Image (cartoon, rainbow, N blue to C red):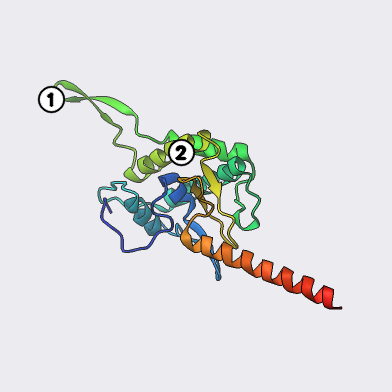
Amino acid sequence: MGNESSDRTWVLPEEPIPVRLMATIWADADGLHDDLAAPADLDAWLGSVGVQLNGVGATQEESLRARALRDSVRKLAAHVTGDKRPGAASPVTTVDDAARTVNAAASWRPIAQLRLDDARLVLGADAAASSVVAGLADVACEAQQLLSGDPSQLRACHAPGCVLYFTKTHPRREWCSVTCGNRARAARHYQLVRSARGAREHTER
């Protein structure tokens, strides 16, 4: 797919790439959605974050590896942020398992290899590594940096029904998006009105 633009709309496009990977699991009134359900979805997502696939499409195995990486990053993000939201639960069992998966993915980067080119030694990437796997390795390396950095930077969005994470780019930022902020404020207002009504009814009895 190269770096061709996709006509798909992705969640949280302004966030760092590891957060965008985690955001391929999202929720709305219809329930949870997985934007990496098929290899073609992975191709589209990698293209949207600038990974050059050079016409190569993801295989089913690479699609499974991408989802395992995504689920592991989400598990580690939940650990870092103390996230207990039921809807954000990861299928990865332990934090140690998640860390091993991310570390293994980071090692998928092509290894530099010496080879002869017209009797001259040149250094180049291992051609055996697919551009899909190499792209996922770069994402894993970025995830390592994000997850091991400032723990106050990464946050879970606690708006009603949200399962996303975001980076706190402003001291007053509380939500992953304006939509979630509006939803949270509406829920808070509803709860205040309901509490006030309940207190008034109790007083009038």
Quarter of the image for residue 204 reads bottom right
Query: Residue 44 appears in which quarter of the rendering?
Result: bottom left
Disc 2 to disc 1, C-alpha distance: 34 Å
- Percent across and percent down for residue 5 are 27, 57
Residue 78 location, x and y as percent? 60, 46
Rendered residue at 33%/53% (across/down): 48
- Residue toward you, 82 or 117: 82
As drawn, is 44 to the left or to the right of 156?
left
Residue at image mark 1: 118
Residue 3: % across, % down = 26, 51
The vertical placement of 127 against 204, above or below, is above
Q: Secondary structure at mark 1?
A: loop
Q: Which of 123 and 86 lies nearest the eye of the viewer? A: 86
Q: Is residue 186 left or right of residue 131?
A: right
Q: Residue at x 61, y 58 (%)?
A: 87
Amino acid bearing label 2: Ala
* Residue shown at the point (51%, 49%) measured from the top left: 172
Q: Which mark is residue 105?
A: 2
Q: Residue furthest bottom?
A: 205
Amino acid type of the residue tagged 1 in the rendering? Asp
Residue occupying the far top of the picture: 120
* Residue 145 in view: yes
Which one is in front in this view, the residue at disc 2 or the one at disc 1?
2
